[in-house]
Image (cartoon, grey):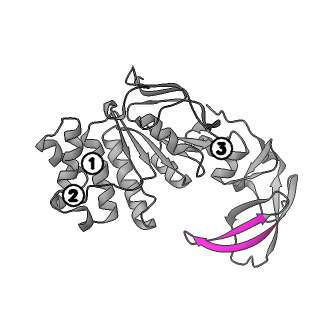
């Protein structure tokens, strides 16, 4: 399968600080890569370099077989969708989309009409940004990016300013939009749930490099290191070499197998999908975990039993 985008040993230094350390990955046509990691880890810097807004210190960017590392932003066939829609307030919805098409001299009435239909805003085409909702504004921003007919679209936390309900709705809409049109994309977020929903593969980013790139099921089943396991949740990290998936941990004493025992304190109780969830602090490991509780469990201190047969070693590939 031919790669649309190939990144080879990309690095970025700023005042002797390594922001990116030999980043390498590739995307085939229609693939969506989610990049997730803590704030300040360099995710947005990577997008800005790919978009041509910042130069890399080293490495190369190859788009559709052509090296574009030194190419100016307006010459790259890449669009960037920001956290804020950044629409022109004096232009209508239609005019904002037309602006994107005119930048690359691809303005066409039928194409603009098709994009308005695709984002379900045909009846709002003559409205101004202030007259439509935040979610609608972000859809216009996506259509404007699409109007340039890019080979790749970069998303920099585009839903972060929306309320939770609208954010969930727009995630599903954008994911379907990208799938239906086989649009190669990179989606940056700090939300693991959002990363799982949006990406065909997920890249865990920390300390200027990808700690692991894989499908979501592989990330959870075989995390590469303690950072991946801790960031994703769903595991208890016992030390630098060992962990146990949380689904195997028990609050009742097992009767038929060997186990390790650790103590925890229930700090909070919440409900998710009708199930009581205990938010537990494990003092000896300095970790916080969340797991289902029975409603009869009213104690503040709990013992967690970890079956020895389910304790595993870190070993996922960070490639």
Quadrant of res 305: bottom right
Q: Relative to 286, is 74 above or below? A: above
Q: Position of residue 78 (x, y in %)?
A: 35, 35
Look at 65% across and 43% down and name the residue there. 221
Observer-nearest of 319 and 53? 53
Query: What is the crowding at mark 3: few (fewer than 14 residues within 10 Å), some, or many (at least 20)?
Result: some
Assign the C terminus to one quadrant of the image. Answer: top right
Vertically, is 239 above or below 103?
Answer: below
Residue stretch in magenta = 264-281
How far apart marks 2 and 1 lie (CA) works out to 10 Å
Q: Secondary structure at mark 2?
A: loop
User: Who comes first in sequence, dot 3 or dot 2?
Assistant: 2
Residue in the picture at 23% in, 35% down? 104
Q: CA distance from mark 3 to mark 2?
A: 41 Å
Q: Is disc 3 placed on a helix, strand or loop?
A: helix
Q: Is residue 222 visible?
A: yes
Mark 2 near mark 1, Cβ–Cβ under 8 Å? yes
- Residue identifier under label 3: 221
Taking the spot 41% from the left edge, 23% from the top edge, the residue there is 2
The quarter of the picture where the N terminus appears is: top left
Disc 2 target residue: 121
User: In the picture shown, does residue 141 fall above or below 272?
Assistant: above
Number of numbered discs overlaid on the protein picture: 3
Residue at image mark 1: 143
């Amino acid at each position: 399968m031919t790669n649309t985008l190939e990144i080879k040993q990309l690095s970025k230094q700023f005042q002797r600080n390594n922001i990116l350390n030999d980043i390498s990955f590739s995307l085939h046509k229609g693939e969506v890569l989610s990049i997730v990691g803590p704030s300040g880890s360099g995710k947005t810097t990577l997008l800005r370099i790919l978009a041509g807004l910042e130069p890399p210190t080293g490495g190369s960017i190859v788009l559709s077989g052509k090296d574009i590392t030194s190419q100016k932003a307006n010459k790259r066939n890449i669009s960037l969708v920001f956290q804020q829609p950044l629409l022109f307030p004096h232009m209508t919805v239609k005019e904002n989309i037309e602006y994107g098409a005119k930048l690359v001299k691809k303005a066409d009435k039928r194409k603009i009409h098709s994009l308005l239909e695709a984002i379900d805003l045909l009846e709002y085409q003559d409205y101004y940004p202030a007259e439509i909702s935040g979610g609608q504004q972000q859809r216009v921003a996506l259509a404007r990016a699409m109007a340039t007919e890019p080979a790749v679209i970069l998303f920099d936390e585009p839903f972060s300013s929306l309320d939770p309900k609208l954010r969930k709705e727009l995630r599903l809409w954008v994911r379907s939009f990208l799938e239906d049109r086989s649009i190669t994309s990179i989606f940056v977020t700090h939300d693991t749930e959002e990363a799982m929903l949006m990406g065909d593969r997920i890249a865990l980013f920390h300390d200027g490099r990808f700690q692991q790139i894989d499908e979501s099921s592989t990330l959870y089943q075989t995390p590469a290191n303690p950072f991946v396991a801790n960031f994703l949740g769903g595991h208890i990290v016992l030390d630098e070499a060992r962990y146990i998936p949380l689904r195997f941990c028990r609050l009742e004493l097992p009767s038929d197998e060997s186990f390790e025992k650790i103590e925890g304190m229930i700090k909070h109780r919440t409900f998710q999908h009708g199930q009581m969830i205990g938010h537990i602090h494990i003092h000896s490991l300095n970790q916080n975990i969340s797991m289902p509780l029975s409603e009869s469990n009213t104690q503040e201190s709990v013992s967690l039993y970890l079956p020895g047969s389910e304790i595993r070693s870190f070993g996922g590939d960070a490639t």
